[in-house]
Every structure is written in structure tokens, then in C-alpha cells.
Amino acid sequence: MNLIDQARFFIVYPVDLEDLGLVELKEKFVQHFSADSLTLVKIIPGGIEIECPLHIGLSLNSVLRTPTRILLRLGEFKCRDAPKLFQKISKFNWSPWLIGQTPEIESATSNSRLFDSRKIEKAIQDGVIQYYRHKPVKKKYLGHFEKADKKVLPTIYFRAVDDVCTISLDTTGERLHLRGEKILTGLAPIRESLAALLLIELKTHLAPKDYTLIDPMCGSGTFLLEALNANAVTVEREFSFLHTPVVLDNFTAMQKIHSSGLRAFKNLIGFEINSEVVSMANRNCKDTDIKIEQADLFDGKPNKIENSVVVINPPYGIRVGEKGEINLAYYLKIIENVKNKFEPEILGIIIPADNKIKSIPNFTIHSIRPFKNGGIEVLFYVLKNIRL
Ligand SMILES: C[S@@+](CC[C@H](N)C(=O)[O-])C[C@H]1O[C@@H](n2cnc3c(N)ncnc32)[C@H](O)[C@@H]1O
């Protein structure tokens, strides 16, 4: 296997948001690689399967902001029992991918005779060890294995559907929403990759002009940081693919990728009621042009900002303990206050799914997208201000 060979990847996304992931995928191919090096194989719930040169697929870990992780597809075969799985694995060509570790296994099965995760794990691990017996790992890789942090070595993903088994290698390691730089978080922060996906949704409703993005309940500043870094390249992280023979041998041939510097919003402004959270957000945003101030959305002071877009992830009253007053009337009050305070062109707001909004004074509903945020069913409403 060579870095320029075609390879098949499965890019994992939160269910129901795959189409937004595809928007980013296409954009980033245009920015960093040649657009025609991407072949779209299929989109299924939970991810997108693509084909592209191996080095590009691996590099997607640094340029994509929206996936959960990126798996490299290694093989597919029919198999109904553990002894056959062991056989298949022991004959598989592991030389380009493993450096002497007994890999961790993640398995998922449906409607298959192989379903016991402990048996699957044992058959795969024993199969890999059997492979090493016949084809011992080269000393240079064993040396790398000795020194490597074992937590970042690639996990093998096993999936069986109707007795058809797919073997993949995780190229990512810790989930991709961890950007490398550690950020301080307030209560109930939204996961970075989800924020990046929702910003893509919002962008699809915007005209090509300079907008100011406002988050009036910004917490630790996730939306603002994701908007700022939408085209950044993650360099501070150690991805699992770095610990494979094919990359260790050819690392210098991996293309250096630079951030394009493009940004979707000209100005980024956040407000937050809790002073401790404000100072946390300011620390997260230091050395950036993001402005964060302490303010109560309900204080009644108008702050009209030309060409503005508001994004908001209000409390749900489920995780944070604020029960009682958090209901449909609360979300309608937020929308009314956003309207009176900022007069935005567009408002994107996440609302728990049991608070469906049918109509809203002064706004038209542009889109409603259901998804899960931290296990809670929610809806992302994009509303357009009809008074402007
Ligand atoms: C669910 S969290 C949003 C978290 C944020 N999106 C993040 O990722 O960190 C809601 C935030 O709204 C803040 N908040 C609640 N009521 C507010 C109000 N009336 N005005 C401004 N902020 C408020 C809370 O302190 C909390 O930080």
C-alpha cells in the first residue's frame, strides 16, 4: 500500500446531519486538494463513504471540523462464526497498518450470527497475533510501538450486518471534536463538531456579504470559536494514523496543509449572563478578535447590529437543573428578545423537540432540523426576520 493509492474511507457524522458534513467535505476538497480526487460512494445514516488517495483521506482528520471520526475501510467478507473470523483476520495483510500492538476492537452487529462482542474481540486479536507469528513486525516499527502512547494506536472497527463483516481502521483516535487546544467549558456546552455543522446550516441561508455573528447565550464561546476556526487546520493533535507503518515510512511525503484563512463571519460577538462563564469564555477567546461581554438577554436594552445573524443554544432545563419556567413560552420569549435587541436578519436556535413552534411573530421559519444534542432530541430552527 502506498500513500497515493486509492483508499475507501467512512467519515462518521451525527445521524441526521450527514448532508451538512457533505457541504464541508466538498468545500474543503476544493480548498486543499483537487475536487476531482473525491469520489462519493454513498451517504448512509451516521456517515459518508468516499474514495480518494490514502494520504488525502488521512489528512481529512486535520482539515474537517464536522465529523466525529474517520475510518479507513480495510475489507469486507461474509462470515458467520468466530473460527472463520479468526481465519480471515490471520490471513489479512496487516503489515501497512499495525506496528506490533494487540489492537483494541470496537464491534457493532445487526441481524448476524456473529454478535457476541467478547468472541468477536478475541477472534480478531488472536487472528492478528497469528498474523504476527507468520510475518513478524519489523524492528523499526516495534521500536516505535515501545515508545508510542498506547492510547493513540488505531482501534479496529468491526461491523456485521446480515453476516457481512466490514473491517476498518480508526485513523483518528480521540473524537475529532477535540481540536487539540483545550478549552474551558461552562454548563452544557455544545460539542464543537455539532456547532460547526449548525453553522454550515446557517450559512446556507445567508447572502454573500459581511455578517456579524452574535451568540447571546454564548457560554464558553463554542459557536464563536467554531465560526472563527471553520477553515483552520488542526495541527496540535496526535492522530492514530501517524502510528501506522505506511505513514511512518512516508511521513515526509504527506502534503503539508495550511489554513486557508477564509472566514464565514466578519465579526464575532458573544454575550453571557454568568460572570464566571464570561471570564472563562474570554480566556478561551484570548488572542482572537471575538468580543465577549456580560449581558442578560432579557435586560430590554436594544443593541441593533447591521447585517447580523444570531445563533443560540439556550438551556433545555433537562441537564442543568433549571426546570419549571423552561417551556415553549420561555423559547418564544428568547426569540422575541433577540428580535427586539439585535434585529438580526437570521436567527438559528436549538429547542428541545417537545417544544414545537408552529409560527412566530415577525419571523418566517426557513428550516427545521431534528438531531440529538447530548442524547436529547432537539430541533434547530432557522428563522428569517420579515421586518427587515
Ligand atoms: C446551554 S448553555 C450554552 C452553551 C454554549 N453554547 C457553549 O457551548 O458553551 C446556555 C448558556 O446561556 C446562559 N444564559 C442563561 N440565561 C441567560 C440570559 N438571560 N442571558 C444571557 N445568557 C444566559 C447560561 O449561563 C449558559 O451559559
Image: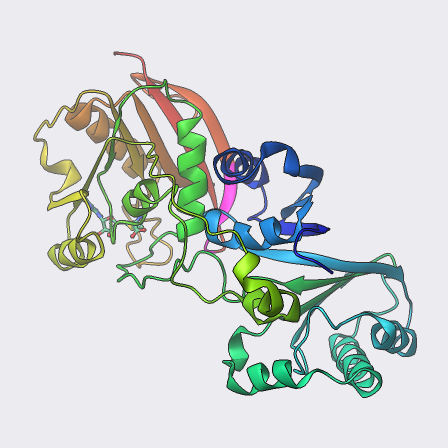
From the viewer's side, name the closer residue of 333 and 97: 97
The majority secondary structure of the magenta stretch comes to strand
Taking the view exactly as shown, the residue that stands out farthest to the left is 301
Quadrant in which the C terminus appears: top left
Can residue 111 be seen by looking at this rendering? no
Report the coloring of the rendering: rainbow
The residue under the point 59% across, 46% down is: 15
Quarter of the image holding residue 234?
bottom left
User: Image height check: is 139 above or below 163?
Assistant: below
Left-right relation of 196 to 113: left
Give the answer, above or below, for where 377 lies relative to 103: above
User: Magenta segment, which residues?
Assistant: 370-374
Give the answer, above or below, for where 231 lies relative to 332. below
The image quadrant of residue 41 is top right
Which of the image's four quarters has the N terminus? Answer: bottom right
Q: Is residue 272 left or right of residue 247?
A: left
Q: Can you name the residue that lies furthest to the front here?
A: 252
Please tell me which residue is depicted at 17% across the width and 58% down the height of the picture.
283
Report if residue 373 lies within the magenta region.
Answer: yes
Residue 129 locus on image (x, y percent): 77, 85
Q: Nearer the viewer, residue 257 or 361?
A: 257
The percent coordinates of residue 272 (x first, y second) are 17, 47
Above or below — where is 341 with respect to 187? above
Where residue 335 sits in the image (x, y, percent)?
A: 27, 30
